[in-house]
Every structure is written in C-alpha cells, then in structure tokens.
C-alpha cells in the first residue's frame, strides 16, 4: 500500500512544543474573551505581516461575514466567480447581491478592466480575492473605488505573508480578510482575521465579533460570536515560529515543479506575479485541449496513482444553485473564468511533500507513466 498524497497537508510543529502553551492556559484558566494569548498573537501577527491593526476570528468565513457588517455594505457587490464558495456566500449571508465579473487569465483574479461596466446605482463595494496568493490589481481597483466612492474588501485567504512592491499586500483596500484554516499556508486549525488600517475600525470589529458589546451594559449593534479562543491563539503563536521555514520549503517545491513541468505539451503554468514576494500557497496547472488527456482524465490518472489533486476552482461559484438567476452569472460574461475552471488542476503543495513524490507527479503529468 502506497501512501496517499493529498493536495495539501497541514504543517504541525512537534507535539511537545504545544504542551507549554496548554499548561499556561490550564494554569491561568483564561480560555477565551481577548485573553493573553489572543492579545499576544494579534500583536505578533501585526509585526510579522507588517500591518497596523488586526482582529482575530474563529474562521475566515465569519471574518468575511463580519467585515461586510463593519463597513455596512449593502445592495450590490462586485466580485469574482473564481474562488472558494465562502467569498460569495458571505454576501448572501448579508443579504447582498453578488455581481460576478470575469477574471484575468494571467492571475486568475477578477479583471479590473471589467469593474466599471458592472457598477450600478446599487453598488457599494468590490470584493476581490488574491487568488492563489497572486495580488489582485490593487492600484486599478483602488482608483476605481476612489472615483465611484466604493469600499474594497479583499478576500486575502490565500495571501498570508505575501508582499507586493515591498510591503504587505494586506495594506490595500479598506479591509483584508485572512483564513487560518488547516488547509492554508498558515493555520490555527480553524481561524481567521480582519486586517484594518486604523484603531477606530479595529474597535468596531472587536465589538462586532463579541455580540456587539461595547462595555458591560452597552450593545452597539447586532454582533456575532466570532472570537478566537486561547488554544487557537497559542497554536498560532507556535505556528508563527515556523512560517518562514514553511514558505521557504514551498518555494523550493514550486521551483521544482516549474523545472520538471516547463515545456510539457498542453500544460500551462501560471506566470509568477511581478513585484511580489510570494507565499507559494498553491500550484495550479492548466490542462489545455492540446494535452493528451482531458483535465478530468488527468485528475483520474493521478487519483489512480494515489495522488489527490483538486480542481480549485471548479465549478464556478456563479454556476451553483443559490446563485442561478442572477443577471451576472450569464456564461458569456464569464468566459475566461469558465475556461480556467474547466482546465485547472491544483497539484499537491505542502512543506512535507517529498522529492520522490514531486518527481512521480511530474512524470505522470509529463506522460512518462
Ligand atoms: C479558505 C477560504 C475561505 C474561508 O476560510 P475559512 O477559514 O475556511 O472559513 C474564504 N475565501 C477563500 C478564497 C478561501 O480559500
């Protein structure tokens, strides 16, 4: 029996390194509600990421749902159909109408040239994703938002630690939302955060994630319970000690894949984004019609060899039942996204992926076996 290789495997520091954190929690009996590890983790993340303010959450999805409440977003929001479902679901949970626009094939991010044509009197915000950790077109999005008076919330679930033009990618837009789910580059088992530029916004976020309590007797809004607990926060502090090592190993794997897959007929690799210090969150390939198999046949061939790639992102969010009927889901307007969704395959990418498995995967994709 050979071992199955999944698309990702969480990085976990040695078990004994968790124990001192748990001992401290058991000793001081602070389990949640902005405890000492929560505060320490927020400040350590601000330092590491190079951002001013950050508020921890139980998940990226709750952080997204809350971010929309923080800025009082309503009406219509322009977003991408090429993402994990949570991006658009966060809009439906706020009774906001998603307006999907097509993507740029070079980055798989929403095509900023398509934003203006999608703006209506009901548009209040843009919700782009830094897909695979590739920076969205932050300059153009920022300019359009300024001209039309729109808010910008980045779904930065893939963008932990990414730097663009020498500074944190998370410094763009009104808010950025991170996910620390087990499958992401950096994990707290489950978890997430909202990054914001000023203390006043951070306070509003902190109130909203704690039922809306501003103090013992004042509830400022119908908030939610989105608070990260002390176990998660302490695990995050430990995980943070390893993050540079983790990203360095991912970079080596990315380079190895590029070496071995470069020039395989019918396979395209996404170009490396410009001016970007990457986190190598995913390794997507595109299986073009001139490849020897269809995308789904290659998927099956890999599965038959105990390699579990994933079709991130297929199907498009816009094709799911809860989005059908929206005017913007018309396939003609989303032709690039539809094509990429039909061709994409994300190959295994995680720090403990071994060289012989990388070679095996590339041999299969190259048609050598
Ligand atoms: C993982 C992910 C989310 C959701 O994050 P959770 O922490 O799992 O709730 C949102 N958006 C994108 C693009 C993601 O990949």
Image (cartoon, rainbow, N blue to C red):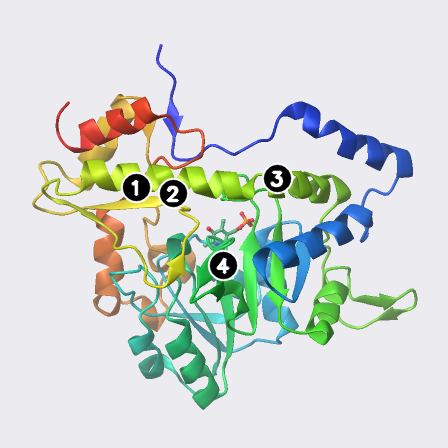
- Tag 1 and tag 2, C-beta contact below 8 Å: yes
Please tell me whether mark 1 sits on a helix, a strand or a loop.
helix
Front position in the image: 289 or 230:
230
| Residue that carries the numbered disc 3 in the rendered image | 239
Spatial CA span between label 1 and label 2: 6 Å
Name above or below for residue 281 compared with residue 137.
above
User: Within 8 Å: ligand 1 and the Cβ of disc 3?
Assistant: no
SS assignment at label 4:
loop
Q: Residue at x 82, y 48 (%)?
A: 36
Quarter of the view holding residue 181: top right
Reading the image, the residue beneath label 1 is: 255
Residue tagged 4:
156
Contact between marks 3 and 1 (CB within 8 A): the answer is: no
Residue 183 visible here: no
Q: Nearer the viewer, mark 1 or mark 4?
A: 1
Say whether marks 2 and 3 touch (CB < 8 Å): no
Q: Position of residue 236 (x, y in %)?
A: 65, 43
* In the rendered image, the vertical position of residue 341 relative to residue 239, given as above or below: below
- Label 3, secondary structure: give it: helix
Furthest-right residue in this view? 217
Tell which tag, 3 or 4, sits nearer the viewer. Answer: 3
Q: Earlier in the sequence, mark 3 or mark 4?
A: 4
Disc nearest the viewer among 3 and 1: 1
Q: Residue at x 27, y 38 (%)?
A: 257
Badge 2: residue crowd in 10 Å (few <14, some 14–19, many ≥20):
some
The N terminus lies in quadrant: top left
**For the residues marked 2 and 4, what is the alpha-carbon distance in whole angstroms?**
19 Å
Distance from the alpha carbon under mark 3 to that under mark 4: 19 Å
Q: Which mark is residue 251?
A: 2
Tell me what residue is drawn at x 42 percent, y 83 percent: 143
Viewer-side residue, 154 vs 297? 154
């Amino acid at each position: 029996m050979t071992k199955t290789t999944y698309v990702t495997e969480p990085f976990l520091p040695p078990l004994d390194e968790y124990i001192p954190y748990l001992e401290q929690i058991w000793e001081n009996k602070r389990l949640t509600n902005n405890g000492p590890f929560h505060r320490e983790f927020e400040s350590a993340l601000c330092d590491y990421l190079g951002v001013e303010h950050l508020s921890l959450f139980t998940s990226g999805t709750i952080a997204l749902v809350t971010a929309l409440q923080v800025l009082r977003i309503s009406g219509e929001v322009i977003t991408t159909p090429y993402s994990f479902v949570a991006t658009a679901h966060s809009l439906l949970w706020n009774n906001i109408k998603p307006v999907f626009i097509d993507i740029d094939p070079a980055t798989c991010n929403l095509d900023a040239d398509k934003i203006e044509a999608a703006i209506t009197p009901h548009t209040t915000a843009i919700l782009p994703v830094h897909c695979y950790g590739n920076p969205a077109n932050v300059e153009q999005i920022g300019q359009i938002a300024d001209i039309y008076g729109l808010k910008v919330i980045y779904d930065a679930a893939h963008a932990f630690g990414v730097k663009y033009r020498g500074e944190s990618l998370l410094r763009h837009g009104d808010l950025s939302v991170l996910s620390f789910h087990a499958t992401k580059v950096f994990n707290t088992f489950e978890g997430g955060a909202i990054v914001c530029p000023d203390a006043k916004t951070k306070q509003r976020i902190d109130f909203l994630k704690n039922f809306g309590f501003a103090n013992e007797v004042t509830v400022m809004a119908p908030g939610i319970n989105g608070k990260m607990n002390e176990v998660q926060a302490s695990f995050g502090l430990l995980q943070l000690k390893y993050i540079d090592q983790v990203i360095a190993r991912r970079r080596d794997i990315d380079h190895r894949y590029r070496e071995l897959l470069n020039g395989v007929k019918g396979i395209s690799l996404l170009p490396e984004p410009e001016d970007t210090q990457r986190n190598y969150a995913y390794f997507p390939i595109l299986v073009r019609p001139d490849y020897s198999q269809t995308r789904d046949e290659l998927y099956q061939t890999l599965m038959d060899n105990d390699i579990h790639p994933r079709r991130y992102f297929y199907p498009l969010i816009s094709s799911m039942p809860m989005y059908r009927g929206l005017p913007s889901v018309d396939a003609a307007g989303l032709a690039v996204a539809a094509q990429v969704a039909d061709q994409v395959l994300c190959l295994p990418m995680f720090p403990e992926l071994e060289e012989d498995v990388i070679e095996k995967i590339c041999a299969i994709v190259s048609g050598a076996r």
